[in-house]
Image: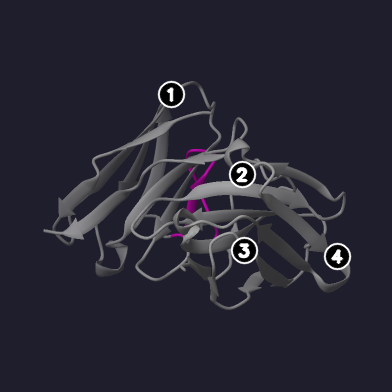
């Protein structure tokens, strides 16, 4: 059974950056794809970007292009999402999600527990 | 970007009754449609993929169907643990997109 464990909650100032981690256990990390999906308070789900760790290839939603970076460390089965130039509208719970189909353009079999990022001055 | 529209926004159902949730795609997404369940304070959980295939461990009371660009999630007989928010997601075209969700509440 795949398990995704994310780093803890963060409080950030506007204009700063945040980096959230997602450690996978249970196998198949490098051959899967990891995506990042966020959920603002009381709102729906929004896909931000994803990576195929074995190739290092990334895809990003146009809305976040230039502001988000998704990376992965195959040796530790850990994926990272860094979001820069934070503003109050970025306050949300950020989830990592794994696609065993090996493509971020797929459904999401497993999800991390979520990481709350609060942006406030 | 494919827009996914879910209806209704809220569905009030009594335990034991059937619930029918809809999701419409702005353009064809073929059968590349998934459904998720999300309970308060929890991450989403995959229920259905390929429009009609139940994910591992999902009870048979959950079923999905497709008619063109219209997708339906049916919960055959609502149990107490089924009251939650349900999201559809297309994975046919970049970027993957979600519907706005349907909240299933106790009537």
Q: CA distance from mark 1 to mark 4?
A: 37 Å
Q: Which residue is mark 3?
A: A16
Q: Nearer the viewer, mark 2 or mark 4?
A: 2
Q: Nearer the viewer, mark 3 or mark 1?
A: 3
Q: Nearer the viewer, mark 2 or mark 3?
A: 3
Q: Give whichever of B42, B20 is nearer the camera.
A: B42
Q: Quadrant of residue A54?
A: bottom right
The quarter of the image holding the N terminus of chain A is: bottom right
Q: Quadrant of residue B74?
A: top left
* Left/right of residue B67 with respect to residue A73 in the rendered view: left
Q: Secondary structure at mark 3?
A: loop
Locate residue A26, reporting x and y percent.
73, 72
Q: Secondary structure at mark 4?
A: helix
Q: CA distance from mark 2 to mark 4?
A: 24 Å
* Pointer 1 and pointer 4 on the same chain: no
Q: Which residue is rendered at x = 57% and y = 58% of the image?
A: A86
Q: Which residue is mark 1?
A: B26
For the view shown, which residue lies furthest in the left direction?
Answer: B107
Q: Quadrant of residue A64?
A: top right
* Image coloring type: one colour
Q: Which residue is mark 4?
A: A74
Q: Which residue is mark 2?
A: A64
From this view, report whether residue A49 is shown above or below residue B42. Answer: above
Q: Is residue B57 visible?
A: no
Bounds of the magenta segment: B45-58
The answer to whether the residues at label 2 and label 1 have Cβ atoms under 8 Å apart is no
């Amino acid at each position: 059974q795949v398990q995704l464990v994310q780093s803890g909650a963060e409080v950030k100032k506007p204009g700063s950056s945040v980096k959230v981690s997602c450690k996978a256990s249970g196998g198949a990390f490098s051959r899967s794809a990891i995506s990042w999906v966020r959920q603002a308070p009381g709102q729906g789900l929004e896909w931000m970007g994803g990576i195929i760790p074995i190739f290092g290839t990334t895809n990003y939603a146009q809305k976040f292009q230039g502001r988000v970076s998704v990376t992965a460390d195959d040796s530790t089965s850990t994926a990272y999402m860094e979001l820069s130039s934070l503003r109050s509208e970025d306050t949300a719970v950020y989830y990592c999600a794994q696609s065993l189909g090996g493509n971020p353009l797929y459904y999401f079999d497993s999800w991390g527990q979520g990481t709350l990022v609060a942006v406030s001055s | 970007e494919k827009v996914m529209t879910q209806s209704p926004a809220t569905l009030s159902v009594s335990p034991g009754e059937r619930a029918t949730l809809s999701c419409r795609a702005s353009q064809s997404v073929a059968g590349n449609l998934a459904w998720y369940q999300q309970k308060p304070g929890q991450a989403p959980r995959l229920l259905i993929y390929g429009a009609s295939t139940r994910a591992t461990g999902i009870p048979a009371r959950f079923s999905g169907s497709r008619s063109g660009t219209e997708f339906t999630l049916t919960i055959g007989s609502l149990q107490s643990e089924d009251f939650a928010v349900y999201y559809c997601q297309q994975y046919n075209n970049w970027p993957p997109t979600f519907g706005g969700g349907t909240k299933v509440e106790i009537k």
